[in-house]
Amino acid sequence: MATTTNAFLSTPTKTPSDKSASGMSRKHPHPNSNPADSSSSSARSSRFEAYNRLQAAAVAFGEKLPIPEIVALGGQSDGKSSLLEALLGFRFNVREVEMGTRRPLILQMVHDPSALEPRCRFQEEDSEEYGSPVVSASAIADILRSRTEALLKKTKTAVSPKPIVMRAEYAHCPNLTIIDTPGFVLKAKKGEPENTPEEILAMVKSLASPPHRILVFLQQSSVEWCSSLWLDAIREIDPTFRRTVIVVSKFDNRLKEFSDRWEVDRYLSASGYLGDNTRPFFVALPKDRSNISNEEFRRQISQVDSEVLRHLSEGVKGGFDEEKFRPHIGFGRLRDYLESELQKRYKEAVPATLALLEQRCSEVTDELDRMDSKIQATSDVAHLRKSAMLYAASISNHVVGNHSELF
Ligand SMILES: Nc1nc2c(ncn2[C@@H]2O[C@H](COP(=O)(O)OP(=O)(O)OP(=O)(O)O)[C@@H](O)[C@H]2O)c(=O)[nH]1
Ligand SMILES: [Mg+2]
């Protein structure tokens, strides 16, 4: 075990950060983690770091490894990319990229208290190495846009399943990896290939199918569950929502409709559509799209959270069932839940991941041994001469044999 771990950690993945694990420990409290079963925060950080490296290597080499990952999915414009930005605590303008998400984005967020400004790095397109840090939000948006456009031009498609990997170290983000996906659509846009909706569905399904992935399914609050366009697609992937976190997005658009407690409580319970054990999260994010500082962005996020709660308890007659629904209301609750859920899965997955890596290691070692003996054989001149003579003899036998058959 130890050998594999060390060998793995020293793989030349060029992960930019080599800070000590303790340097990345979280400072803020973690309401959902259970101290009894959670490991120390430095162990959590180094486990997270190791999985991030493994993820980058898997993407670079096209390996399918059962790494716990979160996939955000849902209809077009349901707020997936906005949720990613809010999780990162920094607006990098994905939602400003007019065309919407066209390639999956693997966003590896690394909580690093020393990174007072976000440090973002993109993994190079066909290697496991990360490029140099990109600081400004507009430069990040430009890279996302140009990489997307360049690839789509090459593939002549409207979407591509090849992911972009971005690693962001920041003092204000959680340790969390989430994959943003292109939104489901009913019809292709003008000028796009007709089969774009099917392409998106197939791509997202294949991203969401591996059972080790947690799905975050977003649907706008204005849509009723009975007329949900994409719930069935999610059910096909995960029929009982065992690994699905349902997020009702843009909750601000619905809030004003509630006047009595029974209305809110009925709405929040999703009135039986999702099964008794599935509790959606209800999230609203700031609407302000002006150019604001990162700090102001985060302040607005928590302000919207408080306003939503205030509205539900003071603006609705009788309030709402706080005991039942409070843990699922607000962006902050969702963020903490996702982070602790992912850490839990990482911990559970470690033995299986190590066993798999050990197996891969021994396969590769065997292959290397075979190559080595081949190389040795070719550097042995006497052996080469003998092989050449045998080869020449067998050819001349053939020629003579075929020749005599002719007569
Ligand atoms: N009112 C309101 N608007 C929101 C909220 N979250 C996102 N939006 C807006 O919804 C629009 C679409 O958001 P995106 O995050 O780009 O949606 P997406 O799901 O990534 O879209 P695709 O990548 O095209 O599938 C943007 O204009 C956002 O500003 C919210 O909580 N409330
Ligand atoms: Mg998007």
Image: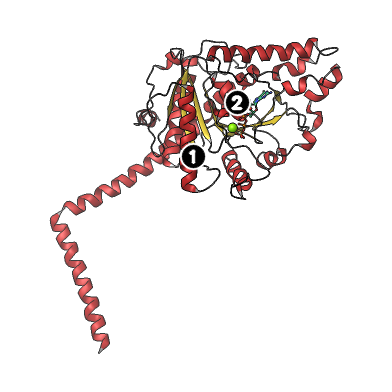
Q: Which mark is residue 149?
A: 1
Residue type at mark 2: give it. Ser
Q: Is residue 372 above or below residue 250?
A: below
Give left or right: position of 381 versus 139.
left
State the image coordinates of residue 264 (x, y, percent, origin top left): 81, 20
Q: Is residue 179 above or below residue 36?
A: below
Category of crowding for the residue at label 1, using alpha-carbon neighbours closer than 10 angstroms: few (below 14), some (14–19), many (at least 20): some
Q: Is mark 2 within 8 Å of ligand 1?
A: yes
> Toward the viewer: 399 or 81?
81
Give left or right: position of 318 versus 350.
right
Give left or right: position of 254 versus 116.
right
| Name of the residue lying farthest toward the bottom | 407
Q: Secondary structure at mark 2?
A: helix
Category of crowding for the residue at label 2, using alpha-carbon neighbours closer than 10 angstroms: few (below 14), some (14–19), many (at least 20): many
Q: Is residue 156 above or below residue 253?
A: below
> Toward the viewer: 306 or 324?
306
State the image coordinates of residue 25 (x, y, percent, origin top left): 48, 14
State the image coordinates of residue 331 (x, y, percent, origin top left): 65, 19
Of tags 2 and 1, which is closer to the observer? 1
Q: Residue at x 21, y 67 (%)?
A: 391
Residue type at mark 1: give it. Glu
Q: Are marks 2 and 1 in contact (CB under 8 Å)?
A: no
Q: Secondary structure at mark 1?
A: helix
> Toward the viewer: 60 or 30?
60
Q: Earlier in the sequence, mark 2 or mark 1?
A: 2
Give the colour scheme of this rendering.
secondary structure
Distance from the alpha carbon under mark 2 to that under mark 1: 21 Å
State the image coordinates of residue 7 (x, y, percent, origin top left): 35, 31
Q: Residue at x 51, y 28 (%)?
A: 107
Ligand 1 positioned in quadrant = top right
Residue 265 picture quarter:
top right
Which residue, given by chain and number where applicable, does mark 2 sit on?
82
